[in-house]
Amino acid sequence: MEGFLVNFDHWNWWILALLMFVIELIMPGVIFLWLAISATLTGALVWIMPELGWPVSFVIFAVLSVISIVVGRKVWRPGHVESEDPTLNLRAEQYVGQVFTLDTAIENGRGRLNVGDSSWLASGPDLPAGTKVKVSGADGSILQVEQA
């Protein structure tokens, strides 16, 4: 094993980088990409400075890997998409600010109101059925209302 590591030159780093690129293509998770970039850069450094020993080149690879993963995660965040409609999947919050009529009276802080073809739980001050209420907030699927 020692003989293999002593002869670990720039070609080995570039082959390792290519292998990591292939692994990234097969199992996308955007982790092997950063490791492959680090191996490519380490191979370039070993090519420029062949007198670096294998322990130094592995330390360089480790440091570059950590740096590239941290920087890569900050710059390129998979799954983070800015939405034009931030309440798209927050149905209750879409009703904030709208006025509806109470279907059942709010008693002890709880009642119901119809919104379109669905009935929602409402919380707020005690009010009789038929009162116009304005949605002031949402707590999960409970609409918080106040008299309009």
Image (cartoon, rainbow, N blue to C red):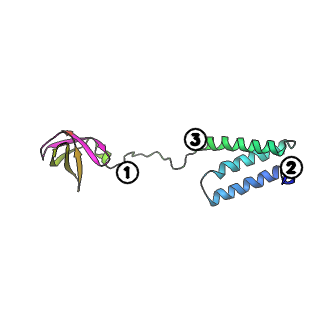
Q: Amino acid at mark 2?
A: Val
Residue 70 appears left or right of 36: left
- Residue in the picture at 64% in, 58% down: 25
CA gap, disc 2 and disc 3: 35 Å
Query: Of helix, strand and loop, which one carries label 2?
Result: helix
Instruction: Kindly check if marks 2 and 3 are in contact, taking CB atoms under 8 A apart as contact.
Output: no
Q: Would you name the residue on which mark 1 appears?
A: 89
Circle nearer the N terminus (2, 3): 2
Spot occupied by residue 93 in the image (x, y as percentages of width and height): 32, 45
Spot occupied by residue 43 in the image (x, y as percentages of width and height): 78, 47
Foreground mark, 1 or 2, reads 2
Q: Amino acid at mark 3?
A: Lys
Q: Quadrant of the C terminus?
A: top left
Q: Would you name the residue on which mark 2 appears?
A: 6
Q: Quadrant of the N terminus?
A: bottom right
In the image, the segment drawn in magenta is 125-145
Circle nearer the N terminus (1, 2): 2
- Residue in the picture at 78% in, 51% down: 13
Q: Is residue 23 above or below residue 44?
A: below
- Say if the magenta span includes residue 133: yes
Circle nearer the N terminus (1, 3): 3
Relative depth, front residue between 132 and 5: 5
Residue 114 appears left or right of 62: left
Spot occupied by residue 107 in the image (x, y as percentages of width and height): 15, 44
- Residue in the picture at 35% in, 48% down: 90
Q: Amino acid at mark 1?
A: Asn
Residue count near mark 2 (Cα–Cα under 10 Å), binned few <14, some 14–19, many ≥20: few
Q: Is residue 137 above or below residue 13?
A: above
- Say if the magenta span includes residue 142: yes
Indicate which disc residue 74 carries.
3
Query: Of helix, strand and loop, which one carries label 3?
Result: helix
